[in-house]
Amino acid sequence: MEIVPSPSRRNLASETCSDTGQRVRFYRKIRGLSVRTAARLAGLSPAFLSTIENGHRNLDRISHVVAVADVLDVSPADLVGVDFLAQKRKQGGTSLDAAATRLRLTLAVASLPTQSDSASTMEVGALADCVGRLQSLFLECRYGEVLHQLPDLIDSIHRMLATGKRPQENTLRRLLIATYQNLCMQVLRELGYIDLMQLVVERANALACESDDLVIQAVSSWQQAQLCTRLGLCEQAADVALGAADQLSSTTLGTRRMKVMYGRLHITAALAHARLRPQVEASAFDHLAEARNMLDWLQPQPEAYPRLTYASFLLNKLELVNVLGHFDDAPAIVDKVCAIQKRGIVDEYSFHLLAGTALARIHARQRQAVSHLKDAEIISPHMLRADPYARRAISHLLAEPSYESVNATVRGLAYRMGTVVPLA
């Protein structure tokens, strides 16, 4: 069998196009994929992938690396080396991987008994203010700054807990759970640190189990189910989500927070079941209907995390359309979202992404689809260019005849996403 150099033993400076191409070909053959199939799944052209494998061109764009690695079911480092990714994962000139390593060490140490250091502790109010500031930074998409400050925040909360001040212990535990659930998980998801998300889920779940708040426990289960879905463990995701929903329903769903989580859990179960098609595809819509029933009791809904509004419900339904490929249902959903969009309660990026990727498959709505994809790129270019649904939609638009006025825009999007544009 052909020997492929281990990523840990490779020196990036000595890497050649031929080395990278050999590894791509090796892993592709192991997966039993043809060049055409692998290229199509990655949103690239067969000719481009062939030039990579033949050593005529290097795999030097992060979007290409991630897309090809995803198709070949290997880590990006297996293709191009660890140093490449560490160099690319920067915000403001500072390595995100270094911040992630600090967070990992902090989480590991936080699980050990700690001697309190009164000189380094903060007041509970100051810690709560710090959490609020980081949440504001997250909403401004300043993920790198949040990631860099999280280790110090978590360490400070644990030091405060170690002082053993009973009147404050319950408040501090809730603050720590909120930090894990509302900050760590969201930031790590946006930055793509899946392995670290697993560690945070474990920490949050351990704290949630000690709490008598069913909603906190439900949020922990919801995040665990979301992580399982992202890892491809869809059956496990559905079981976790439905188990938590059943636990909530046994309490008659007396509060708004319970109703929100009950709806979110059923939506998560719906999306997990959708990915298990065709065996349980019908149940996905049953769970979505169960979530829809919650909305009648939740309007108007105060600010809470996670939120369940009519707009979020429609976006989840639009995601279900993308997962199942029921693209003919998309126009009606998009029109409903547009009707309520003026109120400013819609997640703009998610809406434009999901609308663009679904409408791209309907010839008569392709102009509208491209407009949505352009808007998504304006809001968050790095997220759009790494999204698999967006890559597939762009590849679809490039592959089929379309309006000439749309073609130029699509080619521009494809170029910026790193997808090879066929010659006109």
Image (cartoon, rainbow, N blue to C red):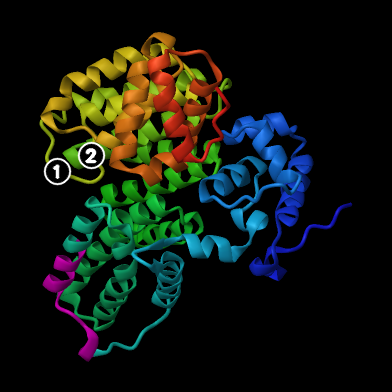
Q: Is residue 314 magenta?
A: no
Residue 354 in sight here: yes
Q: Which residue shows up at 14% across the image and 66% down it?
A: 129
Helix, strand or loop status at disc 2? loop
Check the image and report above or below for 201 versus 246: below
Which image quarter: residue 165? Answer: bottom left
Q: Check whether the beta carbons of the residues at disc 1 and disc 2 lie within 8 A of each other.
A: yes
| The one of 23 and 122 positioned closer to us in this rendering | 23
**Residue 234 screen position, x and y as percent:** 53, 37
**Residue 106 screen position, x and y as percent:** 40, 74
160 sits left or right of 406 in the view: left
130 sits left or right of 285 in the view: left
Q: Which residue shows up at 30% across the image and 36% down it?
A: 349
Spatial distance from mark 1 to mark 2, Cα to Cα?
A: 7 Å
| The one of 27 and 277 positioned closer to us in this rendering | 27
- Which residues, given as a range, are shown in magenta? 118-131
Q: Which residue is tagged 2?
A: 307
Mark 1 neighbour class, 10 Å CA radius: few under 14, some 14 to 19, many 20 or more: few
Q: Which residue is tagged 1?
A: 303
